[in-house]
Amino acid sequence: MGLTTEQLTHAMDALAAREPAFAVALERVGYPPPRISARGFGTLLRTIVGQQVSVTSAQSTYKKLEGIVGSLDDPANIIAATDEQLRAAGLSRQKASYARSLSELVASGALDLENLPEDDEEAIAKLVAVKGIGRWSAEIYLLFAEGRTDVWPAGDLAVQIEIGRLLGHEARPSEKLVRELAEAWRPHRGAAAIFAWYHYQSDMKVV
């Protein structure tokens, strides 16, 4: 599971003590709510299904897929499904290939999602070795499904935008700069990312 309310509160208090911009923003919008996903195959499959489509479309496809092949927590159901069934659920040929690859790796034990490496970078490397799982997807999984406190998705556009706004940058900082800026926030970078998304959404509501 992801970071709990208690963990987020503790981490944000620590960040606010180090970075005045966080303190000001925290006073304005409050603490972010937890963002939690289940650990395991189903969550990574959702990541593949949701690539390059809207949240609503992804949810519809996932529900349709579940109705056709059965529980999506069991990789055997994807392995047993025909190409026609996967297409009928709305998966493109590429996504179907990614889903099968993930299913086979998990079913064979080559990818053990219950025992990923403790080192974050090693865990990310293990996940991105799967077809269809990029660094961003791996980082989001580790943050939301495993609650790893220091995962920092610096390549996320919303994170870049909001960190730039919070720190008073005139232009959106690059991924490289965002990584450099966040070094001072270890080991609470995961909470910083969750707060950046929360603050970004708060800004959108104001607009």
Image (spheres, helix red, strand yellow):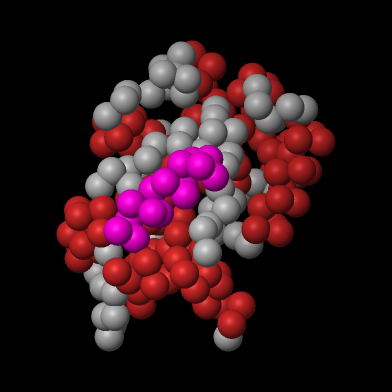
Give the x, y percent position of residue 87.
69, 44
Give the x, y percent position of residue 89.
74, 44
Q: On the rendered image, what quadrant is the N terminus found in? A: top right
Residue 137 seen by the camera: no
Residue extending farthest top: 108
Q: Is residue 193 left or right of residue 43?
A: left
Does 15 lie within the magenta span?
Answer: yes
Q: Residue at x 52, y 64 (%)?
A: 30
Report the span colored magenta: 3-17
Residue 18 seen by the camera: yes
Give the x, y percent position of residue 201.
55, 70
Q: Residue at x 18, y 59 (%)?
A: 180
Q: In the figure, 98 relative to 27: above or below?
A: above
Main secondary-structure element of the magenta-colored stretch: helix
Q: In the figure, 55 relative to 41: above or below?
A: below
Q: In the figure, 106 relative to 8: above or below?
A: above
Residue extending farthest right: 67
Location of residue 177 by image quarter: bottom left
Q: Is residue 103 left or right of residue 128?
A: right
**Is 16 in front, or is 137?**
16
**Is 182 in front, or is 154?**
182
Q: Is residue 35 left or right of residue 138?
A: right
**Is 30 in front, or is 83?**
30
Does 133 lie within the magenta span?
Answer: no
Q: Residue at x 55, y 28 (%)?
A: 40
In this figure, what is the number of numbered marks?
0
